[in-house]
Amino acid sequence: MLLMAAALSGCAGSGGAPVKTYDLGAEPPKASLPPLRAVSVRAAMPFDGNDMLYRLAWRDPAEIAAFGQSRWAAPPAELLRKQLLRALPEAKEAPCALAVEVNEFTQVFSAEQASEARIDLRAALVGRAGPVAARGLSVSEPNAGANAAAGAAAFARATDRAVAELARWIAAQPACGG
């Protein structure tokens, strides 16, 4: 009897609505990265989980909330790493490794029906002899809609732009083959 009550309370908590799961799509980024020895991506809390996070900037820009019935298929750092790996050319050897930290991955609402996908990253290139270069990168993709599905599509576009910006930056580093 207790087991049945626990199962029913679990169903009641979700409201019966199915949880939708999103990723950044099946398409690889449009830009190609220069060859890299390795790619690592990690995320600062609270961006290290599968929750799709948003901010209601018109009400309280410091408050972060999660969509109740929508989740990422993997943490944002893993989704970004997958896209970076898809943008890498086949190469046997490369002089540099890329390390990225995700510091923001939220859908920011300026009004009830208007939002943007916002990604803030910190990227570092490391050569065989040590650090080569580091930089911050912020990408905001407007027209992210009013729900998680539209936000996921906007994050795919924002990630594509972030990969292109990282590709240009890496290519400009002489120590990394630029």
Image (tube, helix red, strand yellow):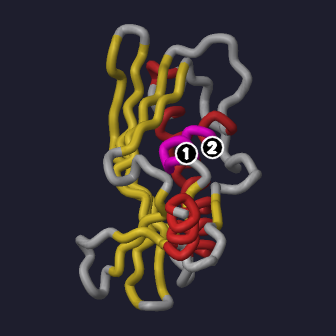
Q: Which amino acid type corresponds to the residue marked 2 in the rendered image? A: Gln
Is 133 above or below relative to 138? above
Please give the name of the residue rendered at 41% of the width and 80% of the height, measured from the top-left corner.
Answer: 109
Instruction: Return the mark for residue 22.
Output: none
**Image point 52% across, 28% down: which residue?**
39
Q: What element carries label 1?
A: helix
Q: In this view, does 131 lie to the left or right of 75?
A: left
Q: Does the image show residue 88?
A: yes
Q: In this view, does 131 lie above or below 75?
A: above
* Residue that mark 2 sits on: 83
Residue 141: percent from left, percent from top: 51, 69
Q: Where is residue 11 in the image (x, y as percent from the top left)?
A: 58, 71
Q: 112 or 135, which lies in front?
A: 112
User: Of the residues shown, which amino acid type is indicated by label 1?
Assistant: Leu
Residue located beneath label 1 in the image: 80
Image-based side of 25 in relation to 83, left or right: right
Residue numbers of the magenta segment: 75-83
* Residue located farthest toward the top when viewing the structure as drawn: 129
Image: 27 above or below 123: below
